[in-house]
Amino acid sequence: MVLMLDESGRQETLSFLEKKSNAGVWSLDFATGQMAWSDGFYDLLGVAPGSIEPSYEAIVRLMHPDDRRPAGEFDRIVGEGLPLDRELRIIQPNGKLRWLSSRTEVRLDKTGKPTRAFGVVLDVTTQREMALAREAAESRFRALVIATNAFVWTADADGKILDVRNWRELRGENPADLLGSRWIDLVHPDDREATVQAWAAALASKRDYQTEHRIRQPDGNYRWMMSRAAPIMLETGAIREWVGLSSDIHDLKVWPAASGADHAVLTGAQLRAGRGVLNWSVRELAIAAAVSSSTIRRLEEKDGPPPGREESLGPLQAALEAGGVEFLFPPSGKPGVRPR
């Protein structure tokens, strides 16, 4: 059965399709140079139907400057009957920017000369904005990977490694050698069983993964790394993939923790960080150490140690250590803090 429509029916059908598809159509008579626009096409341009005379020049006036073709380019394309398929940006009179995708067909006469062109234009703004957002997110992710100076990796739902960022940059080695389950060969033999068990437990429970292990370096030595990962879930509750981070913690592991009896001087930055680890306020630390809040604030004003002898540092350090904090004083570099 063939659907037969009169002129009114065809117009209603076209209007319905344009509204539901956020689309518009146009035509061009090559002999006269006259264009015709549908109501949907006017809507895409952001102007009232019939308010302006349809022409390519009228479209150009609303087109983003970076998307305008060189002078005479449109006439050449039309004259040669070339496709007019393209994407372009329109700045509507109200200031809104819309991405439009135009698909065309050119009709030729028996001699091969173009006679008419027909085009359908779709508003693809949402798709373009999503693509741009993905590109921006990827750029931010790449910047974050570089800034962390760590290895960022992804694994499939079964735990097989798919990709490792920064591996080539930091180690000069091909990350393909780690894919699948081959990464386990780099883990110190004494740490492999615990690593595999922690990873298997995370996969089974669909919960975050964290472990510390020694990883073989290009020179054959081992350094301590902390590897963490979190699952990316689908709406069904299944795991889509894992995203992980492996960072070097070797210096923190080999530095001795400083106790209250050590001669190293606690810094203001360590006090702030220690409170942060325990999520303590200044008042909570003051109560735990029997030290005034004003003294703590004064000591935390500077990142380094106080200029003179400070009797209150001992009770402050002891209180934070009792709460579960370790203070680290490396032979070189900045003092550190870590949970006990």
Image: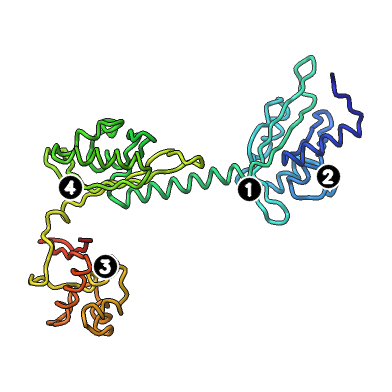
* Residue 178 location, quadrant: top left
For the residues labelled 2 and 4, the Cα–Cα distance comes to: 72 Å
Location of residue 64 with respect to 78 vertically, above or below: below
Residue type at numbered disc 3: Ala
Residue type at numbered disc 2: Glu
Residue at x-position 86% and y-position 37%: 12
Give residue 334's position: percent from left, percent from top: 18, 64
Residue type at numbered disc 4: Trp
Task: Answer with mark 2 or mark 4, whichever residue precedes in sequence.
Answer: 2
Residue ID for mark 2: 53
Foreground mark, 3 or 2, reads: 3
Residue type at numbered disc 1: Pro
Left or right of 261? Residue 205 is: right
Task: In the rendered structure, find residue 318 and report the number of the disc placed on it.
Answer: none
Foreground mark, 4 or 1, reads: 4
Residue ID for mark 4: 224
Task: Answer with mark 3 or mark 2, whichever residue precedes in sequence.
Answer: 2
Foreground mark, 2 or 4, reads: 4
Location of residue 331 with respect to 302 vertically, above or below: above
Left or right of 211? Residue 136 is: right
Task: Answer with mark 2 or mark 1, whichever residue precedes in sequence.
Answer: 2
Task: Answer with mark 1 or mark 3, whichever residue precedes in sequence.
Answer: 1
User: Within 10 Å of the Cα at label 3, are there few (<14), some (14-19), or many (20+) other Cα atoms?
Assistant: some
For the residues labelled 3 and 2, the Cα–Cα distance comes to: 68 Å
